[in-house]
Amino acid sequence: MKLRIMKLRTARCVSPFCLAMLLTASPAFAQGTLPASVSSWNSTQSKATFAIPAAAILKEYGLKTAERRTYTHAGDSLVATAYTFNDPSGAYGAYSFLRTPDMPQADFTKHSSMSPSRALALTGNLVLEFDGARLDRFHGEIEMLIAQAGGHAEFGTYPALPQRLPVDELIPRSDHYILGPVALQHFLPLASGDWLGFSMGAEAELAHYRLQNREATLLIADYPTPQIASSEVQKLSHTLNIVGVTTGPEHGPELYATRDGTTVALLAGAPSKASADALLGQIHAGMAVIWDAPILHRAHEPSMGTMIVGTIVGAGEICGFALLGGLLFAGLRLLIKRRWPGQVFDRPEDLEIIQLGLSSKPIRAKDLY
């Protein structure tokens, strides 16, 4: 009975303490990606719900949460928005979508850009957007906000597909990484629906080029396997007006296409077939399918003579270890028999001698010692 009373009193004492700890820790759980203040700038309450521009496209990139704060100081204001995505690849695509051609490269992060009234920065799976007048005045504050928000980011590898874009004649800041049909329809409305095959695991990269004073659009799509890429090319030949393909429709813009392994490239707006072939010829798949691959480890195999000599030496070492083990055991046995005769090995009560009875004197086990 006393034990029960003590337990009840202990529980009553611990419960308020635990409640106080939870109440104290709750602000930490409620803290968002953006800090409440930075340097001498203070912000209003963060907005979890606000009008997200191009929400359907950002959802294709894997948008999880969005947070916005307005920082003020001495009559100036700075609006910061933090977009959190499922992975860095989706964040990279969203960054390429939100960036406009009038935003040159900035030095906040490796992937960052800024115009007089708008700035973007990519860090891990976060995309940070800043809006304000004459943002170059707030360069230090933006850097601190990016650093503090970056502590909530999850880092990983960014897509490798943008690296396959040809560099010659590329229009700066015209490249976009695409993961869904809505974003593709925004940049290249050639057909309706998922005509490129994103449901089959495709990823795409789009960019604009200046070919003979004419702007052309290049689309590179990469598929999981060469078989899927070949199947999607067959579907595209029936949907789009591809030059040299008789099964496609005759209406619509003329397109030039090529396939290399898992990579399919489409070019729209090319002034001539020669210029299209020159640009498409620079695109290659990031993998190669080969049937007869040489065994690479053969170059490190020893010669036949070395293998034979090694086998003989190894067999000799095994025999040597066996002989040495036998000698050690025999010497130990003789030493024990000499020191303790009939007590450890060949004890009389455990030794039985089979006799033929040819002599009158029987042989006993003790006669052996």
Image: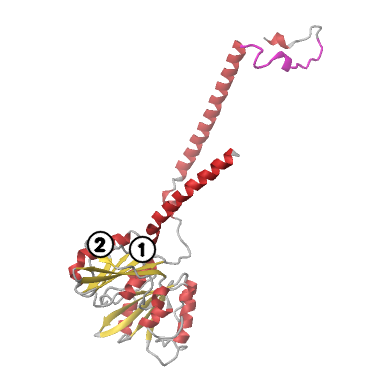
Residue 203 seen from this side = no
Q: Along the line of sight, which residue is nearer the eye, 136 or 276?
A: 136
Expressed as whole percent of the image width and height from the top left, the position of residue 167 reads: 27, 73
The range drawn in magenta is 340-358
Task: Kindly indicate whether the residue at mark 2 contacts the one at mark 1 (C-beta within 8 angstroms).
Answer: no
Q: Is residue 209 magenta?
A: no
In the displayed structure, does residue 351 sit left or right of residue 17?
A: right
Mark 1 to mark 2 CA distance (whole Å) = 14 Å
- Image coordinates for residue 21, horizontal then vertical, percent: 42, 52
Q: Earlier in the sequence, mark 1 or mark 2?
A: 1
Q: Quadrant of residue 82?
A: bottom left
At which x and y percent is residue 351? Answer: 72, 17
Q: Quadrant of the N terminus?
A: top right
> Residue drawn at (40%, 65%), measured in percent from left and top?
87
Direction from residue 283 to residue 144 in the image, left or right: left
Res. 140 mark: none
Q: Residue 369 appears in which quarter of the rendering?
A: top right
User: In front: 176, or 316?
Assistant: 176
Location of mark 2 (residue): 38
Q: Which mark is residue 32?
A: 1
In this rendering, the answer to whether 54 lies above or below 314 is: below
Secondary structure under tag 2 reads strand
The outermost residue toward the top is: 361
**Residue 152: x %, y % from top left:** 35, 60
Please tell me which residue lies in front, 164 or 51. Answer: 51
Image check: 53 left or right of 337?
left
**Colour basis:** secondary structure
Q: Is residue 233 above or below residue 162?
A: below
Pointer 1 local density, CA inside 10 Å: few below 14, some 14–19, many at least 20: some
Q: Is residue 49 above or below residue 32?
A: below
